[in-house]
Amino acid sequence: MPSIAADAGPLIALFDGSDPHHTAAVDFVAVLGQRLTTNLVVVGEVVALLPTRFQLHFLDWAIGALEIDQQTGGDLPRIVEIMRKYADLPADFADASLVAMCERRNIASVATLDRHFDVYRTVDRRRLQYVFFSG
């Protein structure tokens, strides 16, 4: 089964019961049947945005449940290129790092709450397909 990239929004919703997308995130992960792929930039964004009381629960879960890509440093030139190209959104570092990771790993699907992911195109002009979006 092909990998699915995970953006911060669904991961935050999964652990924050007050998030309006919490139930959808729990249901999504329950039927997923595979590990989501993300990077440390997104993990850092999740931890920064989660209330402190949920941070360790998320990190403990992430260790076994997420495939965490380790090559973001090598993606930095492409991340900068993506951020420049989509500066009018603006494309933030986490989103650009996820797009670059998807390009490098040939991942075609993203779990996100961000409508603007529809605008991003990979270097070969592909659009990432949403597999989780309730926003």
Image: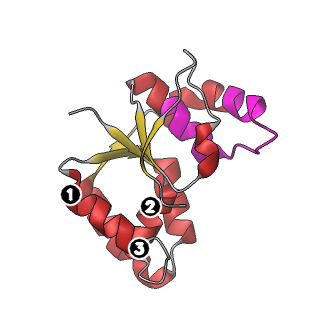
Q: Considering only order in the chain, which callout, 2 or 1, is on the residue closer to the N terminus? A: 2
Q: Callout 2, which amino acid?
A: Pro
On residue 22, which mark appears? 3
What residue appears at the point 44 percent right and 32 percent down from the top-left corner? Answer: 71
What residue appears at the point 25 percent right and 56 percent down from the top-left corner? Answer: 65
Could you tell me which secondary element the residue under label 1 belongs to? helix
Q: Mark 2 points at which residue?
A: 10
What residue appears at the point 46 percent right and 70 percent down from the top-left corner? Answer: 21
Q: Name the residue under label 1.
A: 31
What residue appears at the point 44 percent right and 84 percent down from the top-left corner? Answer: 53
Q: Give the range drawn in magenta.
A: 80-101
Colour convention of the picture: secondary structure
Depth check, front residue: 128 or 14 = 128
Q: Callout 3, which amino acid?
A: His
Tally of numbered tags: 3
Could you tell me which secondary element the residue under label 3 belongs to? helix
